[in-house]
Image (cartoon, rainbow, N blue to C red):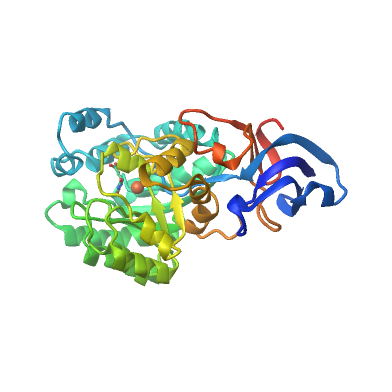
């Protein structure tokens, strides 16, 4: 099938957005077989797309969409002057979601996460990363990861999972952090690996969470098990987690508002993707901006993601996140689109998606838009026309 009469934001190198005017895409067996100018297209059965914009399927490379309960009450508390860290120290924050997630059945979690997932899919997300980390005990972490896998079976989206057992210390280990790290490394992570439920291992390296030394124990275990790593790093302070992550060849370091020059140099050398999460910056009313100029100067690939979670980022829109990355962090609309396509793919270790090029998976989004810059420009507007996944139209019409 030839999709024709398109403006293609291929996101390949060369020119803004890798733009091809009056282009066409040939899809065969779920893959892109050819792409280029319409007048040079090979003969094939073709669909006229009316001159509209086609991009790669969007990739949300950092989410926590599986959880129980909600934290609207804490949103109110924060607006009454209590900080995110204070709420966490008082046993709220992540721990309040842990209580609700432990209490929820697998069916309940699947149902509530499905609703969240649907909001993202309606905007053209075709690949999503989903983290555990609201169970913390072995059983609930496994439950969350099974739900994440089930979401990928029940919805037209590719799901990759990250085990985030080192998200915070559960109440039962409040006074014995070493024992919890032992549980993560000795029991939980091996169980998760055995069940093949984690495509990556993540941790929250922060003053209110895991120290660099504790994080390293988790990374060393992941490395032994052959599972790639990522890290929530330098979100609220600069502990040097990103440098540690770079030493372990991390796929990505995420948040990184407090990342310093040494950290930028380290991740540039390790080829680690910088994942920016403007939703959390916005909700926490953070003042410290991520070091975008330094990342650009060192050519670190920048991805952006919703971080969809009940506490710091109840943001259910990747398009809104692109807009926030532009307005709050000064990314260009092109960087924002690279951030949810080619660079997001890289943050998940994928080589087969995120660009419109021969050999890539035919995950594509057709937009009621003329130019790729139109996507990051509005807020609260969804110009999606159709989604093609593995070469099939799965949403909307052409
Ligand atoms: N940083 C975050 O922003 C999320 N997790 C993390 O490590 C927040 C999770 C939450 O508040 O529930
Ligand atoms: Fe997160």
Quadrant (top left/top right/bottom left/bottom right) for the C terminus: top right
Residue 221: in sight, yes or no?
A: no
The residue shown at (17%, 52%) is 173
Residue 263: in sight, yes or no?
A: yes
Residue 212 versus residue 271: which sits nearer the camera?
Answer: 271
Residue 367 appears at what percent x and percent y?
63, 35
Quadrant (top left/top right/bottom left/bottom right) for the N terminus: top right
Q: Is residue 186 left or right of residue 307?
A: left
Q: Residue furthest right?
A: 43
The residue shown at (31%, 39%) is 282
Residue 129 versus residue 218: which sits nearer the camera?
Answer: 129
Q: Is residue 12 left or right of residue 309?
A: right
Q: Is residue 288 left or right of residue 276?
A: left
Residue 159 appears at what percent x and percent y?
51, 47
Q: Quadrant of residue 270?
A: bottom left
Q: Is the residue 339 above or below the residue 45 in the image? A: below
């Amino acid at each position: 099938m030839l999709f024709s009469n398109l403006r293609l934001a291929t996101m390949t190198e060369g020119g803004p957005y890798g733009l091809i005017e009056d282009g066409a895409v040939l899809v065969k067996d779920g893959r892109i077989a050819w792409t280029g100018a319409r007048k040079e297209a090979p003969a094939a059965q073709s669909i006229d797309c009316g001159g509209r914009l086609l991009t790669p399927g969007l990739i949300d490379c950092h989410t926590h969409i599986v959880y129980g309960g909600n934290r609207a009450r804490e949103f109110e508390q924060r607006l009454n002057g209590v900080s995110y860290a204070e709420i966490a120290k008082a046993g709220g924050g992540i721990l309040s979601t842990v209580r609700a997630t432990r209490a929820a059945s697998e069916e309940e979690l699947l149902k509530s996460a499905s609703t969240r997932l649907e909001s993202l899919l309606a905007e053209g997300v075709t690949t999503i990363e989903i983290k555990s980390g609201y169970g913390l005990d072995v059983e609930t972490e496994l439950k969350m990861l099974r739900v994440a896998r089930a979401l990928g079976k029940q919805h037209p989206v590719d799901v990759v999972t990250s085990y985030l057992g080192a998200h915070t210390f559960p109440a039962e280990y409040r006074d014995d952090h070493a024992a919890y790290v032992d549980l993560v490394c000795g029991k939980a992570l091996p169980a998760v690996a055995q069940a093949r439920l984690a495509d990556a291992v993540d941790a929250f390296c922060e003053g209110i969470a895991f120290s660099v030394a504790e994080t390293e124990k988790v990374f060393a275990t992941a490395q032994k098990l052959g599972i790639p790593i990522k890290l929530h790093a330098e979100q609220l302070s600069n502990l040097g987690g990103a440098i540690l992550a770079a030493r372990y060849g991390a796929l990505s370091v995420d948040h990184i508002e407090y990342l310093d020059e040494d950290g930028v140099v380290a991740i540039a050398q390790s080829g680690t993707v910088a994942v920016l999460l403007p939703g959390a910056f916005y909700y926490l009313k953070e003042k410290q901006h991520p070091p975008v100029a330094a990342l650009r100067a060192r050519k670190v690939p920048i991805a952006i993601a919703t971080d969809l979670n009940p506490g710091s980022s109840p943001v259910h829109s990747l398009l809104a996140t692109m807009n926030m990355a532009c307005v709050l962090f000064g990314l260009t609309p092109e960087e924002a689109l690279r951030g949810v396509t080619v660079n997001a793919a890289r943050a998940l270790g994928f080589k087969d998606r995120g660009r419109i090029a021969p050999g890539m998976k035919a995950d594509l989004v057709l937009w009621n838009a003329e130019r790729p810059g139109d996507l990051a420009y509005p807020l609260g507007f969804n110009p999606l026309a159709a989604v093609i996944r593995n070469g099939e139209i799965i949403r909307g019409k052409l």
